[in-house]
Image: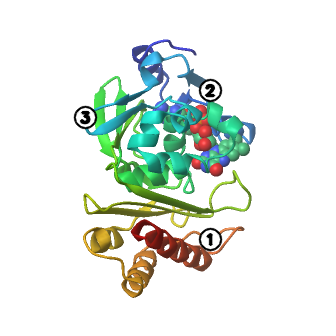
């Protein structure tokens, strides 16, 4: 079905229940259907619902509609200025072709443990607006991701927009990723944003655990003080010990932790340089 308003889309999802799935860019859902890992009997195509697309600057955040294409976000001057971490993260998401169809909402709803956008949203403490026929609610990114491919989206709900806090004007950002080839999903990724002027530091790790992990101790310890390699090494190790790492054909958990600790130290050195 191809609803042309948000209200119609929500009614369809409500009426058809578990049988229906929203279709965004199709870059994850269609491959899953090809592999018979998803077998929805109805697709509710969100592609012509105008309310769901677009980027708008608000007083303290950027409002990004869930159906905004990844390529559009990557090229947007407001995002470059006010959320530079999103831009550096997006450069690692798939390829030009997948980004031209793939959406921010689709990526977050799919919740791959290695998804760069999920990591960027947890790092920046973005909020997601979810809506169903019963109303709407706002949830913080770190509460939205529950497990690999599992989110807080309830029955009949869709993500309508993402609210990304504006980064301080002097923000320095570093996004590191290890993948087998350019455009592949990350085996390990890290995101760091520092503002000297606002004494803030945000640090998070992706691809190691089943959901992005915000490094609260590292972020707190170095937000107001100068960088110290020895303390950072110990804190990074302690943070990563708290993570239950994934093991798969690409890398075991110990290797993921090791690469993440190197990325974290390199990135911290860079933002403090
Ligand atoms: C070759 C290739 C390489 C890729 N590499 C990467 C990569 O390196 N990093 C990465 O992060 N991703 C990668 N991807 C995935 C890509 O980023 C997808 O765009 C993304 O995962 C899904 O976005 P989509 O808009 O295509 O959503 P869809 O595939 O249409 O939907 C994905 C899921 O989200 C649900 N959904 C969609 N929109 C909403 C909404 N608004 N509210 C609630 N549920 C919704 C759908 O029902 C479905 O379950 C790759 C894909 C391909 C094909």
Which residue bears the numbered disc 2? 41
The residue that appears at 51% across and 45% down in the rendered structure is: 87
The residue that appears at 39% across and 16% down in the rendered structure is: 7
Determine the CA span between mark 3 and mark 1. 42 Å
The colour style of the image is rainbow
- Compared with 50, 251 (above or below) is below
Which residue bears the numbered disc 3? 59
- Compared with 156, 94 (above or below) is below
Which residue bears the numbered disc 1? 247
Could you say which is closer to the camera, residue 74 or residue 170?
170
- Which of label 3 and label 1 is nearer to you? 3
- Compared with 248, 230 (above or below) is below
In terms of image quarters, where does ligand 1 lie?
top right
Left/right placement of residue 8 relative to residue 140 reads: right
Could you say which is closer to the camera, residue 115 or residue 194?
194
The residue that appears at 54% across and 38% down in the rendered structure is: 74
| Discs 3, 1 touching: Cβ within 8 Å | no
Instruction: Identify the secondary structure beneath mark 3.
Output: loop
Locate residue 232, reporting x and y percent: 39, 80
The answer to which quarter of the image holds residue 223 is bottom left
> Does mark 3's beta carbon lie closer than 8 Å to ligand 1?
no
The answer to which quarter of the image holds residue 249 is bottom right
Determine the CA span between mark 3 and mark 2. 42 Å
N-term mark: 3 or 1? 3
Looking at the rendered image, the quarter that the N terminus falls into is top right
Determine the CA span between mark 2 and mark 1. 33 Å
């Amino acid at each position: 079905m191809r609803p042309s308003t948000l209200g119609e889309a929500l009614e369809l999802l409500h009426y058809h229940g578990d049988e229906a799935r929203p279709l965004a860019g199709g870059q994850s859902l269609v491959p899953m259907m090809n592999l018979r890992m998803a077998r929805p009997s109805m697709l509710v195509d969100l592609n012509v619902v105008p309310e769901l697309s677009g980027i708008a600057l608000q007083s303290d955040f950027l409002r990004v509609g869930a159906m905004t294409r990844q390529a559009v976000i990557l090229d947007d001057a407001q995002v470059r200025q006010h959320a530079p971490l999103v831009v550096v993260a997006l450069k690692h998401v798939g390829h030009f072709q997948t980004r031209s169809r793939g959406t921010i909402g689709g990526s977050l709803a799919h919740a791959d443990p290695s998804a760069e956008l999920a990591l960027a949203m947890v790092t920046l403490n973005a909020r997601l607006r979810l809506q169903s026929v019963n109303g709407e609610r706002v949830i913080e990114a770190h509460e939205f991701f529950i497990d690999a491919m599992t989110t807080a989206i309830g029955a009949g709900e869709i993500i309508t927009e993402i609210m990304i806090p504006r980064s301080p004007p002097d923000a320095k950002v570093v996004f590191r990723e290890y993948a087998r080839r350019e455009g592949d999903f990350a085996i390990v990724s890290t995101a760091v944003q520092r503002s000297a002027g606002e004494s803030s530091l945000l640090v998070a790790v992706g691809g190691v655990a089943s959901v992005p992990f915000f490094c609260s101790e590292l972020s707190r310890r170095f937000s107001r003080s100068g960088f110290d390699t020895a303390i950072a090494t110990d804190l990074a190790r302690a943070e990563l010990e708290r993570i239950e790492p994934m093991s798969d054909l690409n890398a075991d958990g110990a290797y993921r932790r090791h690469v993440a600790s190197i990325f974290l130290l390199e990135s911290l050195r860079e933002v403090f340089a």
